[in-house]
Image: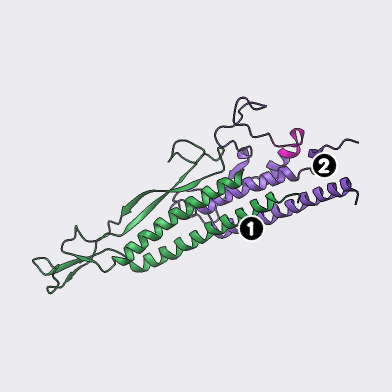
Amino acid sequence: MPLDLNTYLGIEPDALRVYSQRAEVLAANLANADTPGYQARDIDFRAALAAAGSEGGTLPPVTTSPQDIGGASSGAGGVSTEQFLKYRIPLAPALDGNTVDSQMEESQFAQNTVRFQATLTFLNNRFSELSTAITGQ
Amino acid sequence: MAFFNIFNIAGSGMSAQSVRLNTVASNLANADSVSSSAATAYKARYPVFQAIQTSLVTPGAAIDPTKGADASVKVADIVQSTAPGAARYEPGNPLADANGYVYSSNVNVVEQMADMISASRSYQNDVEVLETSKQLMLDTLKLGS
């Protein structure tokens, strides 16, 4: 029975990618905590991962050159989850128009980190299962 | 990979906050500076932060939520406060004008202290983000071993 590594790993690699994109968005929010007029954003994780589940099971690949398979889809940066970026609904916007809530962003970042590490652990387990099967020990 | 961008984003935040700390230090150091005219008296300085999307070419363009997750910070300008400074009657001061007045800076020390705490908290946040991202990258490198 041939083994397709992508099917074997399941949704974990896509989840890892969405988590890392989300970490970037949250880092941008924290860096702009004192920027007047900056509006906090977040990734709609459910929608992003649901998109990863459909369309042949993966997120559309990031392509930066017309010679890539599928052509150049997005502009500079080439972030495939950018269609899922949403503005946060502010709890208490500042007078200068900034809607970053540092404490909330921090807790979301910590949560995102823990989930990333959990996914990494799952992936690691998959690989060690595989090497157990290969070595037969 | 998105984590490499985080280094740039958190780094830009750190440098912006350090500029802010710099202005606070300058304002606090000159809080008691006097001058012989209101025009030459020390004015409090403040940095103006601006969000930029490094993936887009035009800096200062409005943030487009559908384009790029990254938004780093830059110090667009450093402005001087226009609040009036106090004039004190000190005829013995060598800097006093013809009427015996010296003009002090318009620095509000309490406001500067609050600004300093806010800047250092934001800086610590950025360092924390950087530290966490670095750890996650290292963990990903060790995947499967």
Q: Quadrant where the N terminus of chain B lies?
A: top right
On the question of residue A43 being in view, the answer is: no
* Secondary structure, magenta segment, majority class: helix
Tell me if residue A78 comes above or below residue A120 in the rendering. above
Q: Secondary structure at mark 2?
A: helix
Q: Is residue A55 magenta?
A: yes
Q: Secondary structure at mark 1?
A: helix
Taking the image as shown, residue B132 lies to the left or right of residue A7, namely left
Residue B112 in the image: state x and y as whole percent.
37, 65
Number of numbered labels in the structure image? 2
The residue sitting at 48% across, 48% down in the picture is A38
How packed mark 1 is, by other alpha carbons closer than 10 Å (few <14, some 14-19, many 20 or more), is some
Q: Which chain is purple?
A: A
Magenta stretch bounds: A51-59
Residue matched to label 2 = A8
Taking the image as shown, residue B138 lies to the left or right of residue A125, namely left
Quadrant for residue A57, please give it: top right
Q: Amino acid at mark 2?
A: Tyr
Dot 2 and dot 1 residues touching (CB under 8 Å):
no
The residue sitting at 76% across, 43% down in the picture is A11
Residue A110 marker: 1
Taking the image as shown, residue B141 lies to the left or right of residue A74, namely right
Tell me if residue B121 comes above or below residue A52 in the rendering. below
On the question of residue B27 being in view, the answer is: yes
Mark 2 → mark 1, Cα distance in angstroms: 28 Å
Q: Colour of chain B?
A: green
Residue A97 in the image: state x and y as whole percent.
46, 51
